[in-house]
Amino acid sequence: MSLIAAARAVRENAHAPYSKFKVGAALTAASGAVYVGCNVENVAYPEGTCAEAGAIAAMVAAGDTAIKEIAVIADSPKPVSPCGGCRQKIAEFAEGDVKVTLATIDGIVHETTIAALLPGSFDADYMSRV
Ligand code: THU
């Protein structure tokens, strides 16, 4: 199954009764394993979590530590764009050249990289004097 197909499938499980905007994410980790996540909203709105965060949490819980590729899909007019927080979460586990595939359920696909999505990112180098 392709990453987009995996993201499309898990999107069906999203818990999005408030925004009605279901998102699915799937990533391939360094081990080759695929991890998936969907957005999980909460009646206390700020407690909701994004699809990307779910996939990353599943990866880390399983013992993988590096993202090799990630895909995100939603029912949007153009390929869904990860929020700023999710860009930082992806960057924690991905080299800059990691491919990020953004897609709509209608089949529009945009391929980019995490470096392009999060230029000038804060990373551990800034803390080298600590
Ligand atoms: N959302 C994601 O899960 N990932 C994204 O990349 C964009 C936004 C979710 C958060 C919230 O549950 C809903 O989409 C509307 O913002």
Image (cartoon, helix red, strand yellow):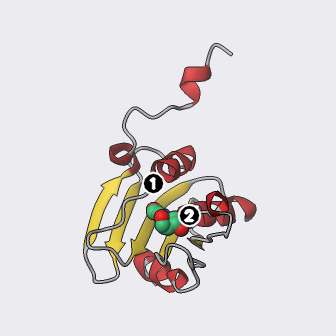
Give whichever of discs 1 and 2 has the lower sequence position. 2
Q: In the visual, does 108 lie left or right of 88? A: left
Q: Amino acid at mark 1?
A: Cys
Q: Residue at x 37, y 60 (%)?
A: 81
Task: State whether label 1 is within 8 Å of ligand 1.
Answer: yes
Foreground of the two, 34 or 92:
92
Q: CA distance from mark 1 to mark 2?
A: 9 Å
Instruction: Tell me where residue 103 appears, x and y as whole percent.
Output: 33, 72
Q: Mark 2 sits on what residue?
A: 50
Foreground of the two, 28 or 88:
88
Q: Residue furthest top?
A: 129
Task: State whether label 2 is within 8 Å of ligand 1.
Answer: yes
Q: Mark 1 sits on what residue?
A: 83
Q: Residue at x 66, y 69 (%)?
A: 42
**Label 1 Cα neighbours within 10 Å, binned few <14 / some 14-19 / many ≥20:** few
Q: In the visual, does 127 lie left or right of 21? A: right
Instruction: Tell me where residue 39 appears, x and y as whole percent.
Output: 57, 70
